[in-house]
Image: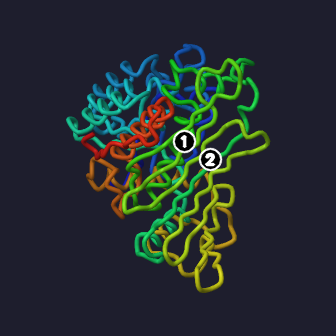
Amino acid sequence: MAGRKLRLAMAGGGEGAFIGGVHRMAAALDGDWALVAGTFSSDAERNRRSGEALGLDPARVHATIDALLADERARPEGERIDAVAIVTPNHLHAPMSIAALNAGFPVFSEKPMAMNLAEARSIADAAQASGQLYALAFTYSGYPMVEEARARVARGDFGRIRLVHVEYVQGWLSTALDREGNKQAEWRTDPARAGLGGALGDIGTHAFQLAEHISGLTVEALSADVTTHVAGRMLDDDVNVLLRFTEGARGTLRATQVAAGEENGLRIRIHGEKGGLEWSQMEPNTLTLRWLDRPAEIVRAGGPGLSPSTLPRLRTPSGHPEGYIEAFGNLYRAVAGTLRDGGPADGGAWGEASRFPGLETGLRTMAFVEAVLDSARSEEKWTPFPALDAKG
């Protein structure tokens, strides 16, 4: 793989899709990947048009994932794809991931990992049996200042962590868009395509992953309130959770898509014995540090004093904004580097050389969805959160 672009196939993300275009821009950003094949839509004409618009050889644009994998397996090793990106609605994540892994191809999948924890465990089994890399697109972990926050917590700048508060606040589903022809809203509020959670699975999993990733702590128990505000909607659109972390830390998680007027308000605050930090996705180049015994500090992307693990995630000098596509690109670059280095198969180890979410992250986020829903249905004050690793 050294000295050439890695060959990428894409499942989903065709004409009219949002996230497929994001993946393609991110994959192209550092010159590591070339999109060469795909199955973009179950609609034959849309699938054809998508491949044509992307300049692909029609022979490598397929009607199904099975046809794509069979064709790629039959090709000479020097032409075969190096990985499959899965950018479909949630109900296809597990069957497509398992098919690709069983066929011997690494997978970079959209989140959440699957429809439920049982499906997620099946993906983990397939990844471990095949020895193939499995990565998840928890994009926000790719931001440079998220890495800076994680590094400062990890080296003990704030002392023992006491408080972890995370929120992901949107307003775009404040009305019944899901019944008004909005395709993005339709599948995200449909249990048959989205899975067990609405806002919980869509953005709550992002907030949960970010909280554990930056704090270095894991949730041990939770107490949740899950609500559907828009009449007739089949999945939740508002979630509030109390969290108990390891090492005695406490926290909260809020995920809502009905906060009218809000855009994409992902924000995290973490406090320890000596001070704390704050990061917001809508101002991603700024990390605010607050101290018990001295003035607050503003740390900027590209500026002085950054941790060594942050620097490789930066592309421009200070004052030149980097954002969502670049964060996504950092994950694609990390996956490419891991494939070229020959491992590890599971990005969940979060090694310094390849920092991207993998099996363990996927399993824990799916367990979080189920634990939140169990808690919301229960009369008990606290619901235990299972201890999970990459083996489930």
Whichever of callouts 2 and 1 sits on the residue coming sooner in the sequence is 2
Which residue is more in the foreground, 243 or 141? 243
Q: Residue at (35%, 28%) from the top-left corner? A: 119
Determine the residue positioned at 55% across, 13% down: 44
On screen, residue 385 above or below 51: below
Work out whether 67 lies above or below 248: above
Expressed as whole percent of the image width and height from the top left, the position of residue 246 reads 37, 58
Q: Residue at x 41, y 52 (%)?
A: 356
Calculate the distance from the C-alpha at mark 2 to the C-alpha at mark 1: 7 Å
Q: Nearer the viewer, residue 68 or 238?
A: 238
Neighbour tally class for label 1: few under 14, some 14-19, many 20 plus, Cα within 10 Å: many
The residue wearing badge 1 is 204
Q: Position of residue 184 (x, y in %)?
A: 64, 28
Which quarter of the figure is the C terminus placed in? Answer: top left
- Mark 2 = which residue? 168
* Left or right, residue 233 beside residue 31: right
* Left or right: 380 in relation to 300: left
Q: Is residue 178 above or below residue 78?
A: above
Q: Quadrant of residue 275?
A: bottom right
Residue 303 vs residue 306: left or right? right
Q: Residue 296 falls in which quadrant of the image?
A: bottom right
Q: Amino acid at mark 2?
A: Tyr
| Quarter where residue 22 is shown | top right
Image x and y of residue 309, in percent: 44, 70
Q: Which scheme is used to colour this image of the protein?
A: rainbow
Q: Are marks 2 and 1 in contact (CB under 8 Å)?
A: yes
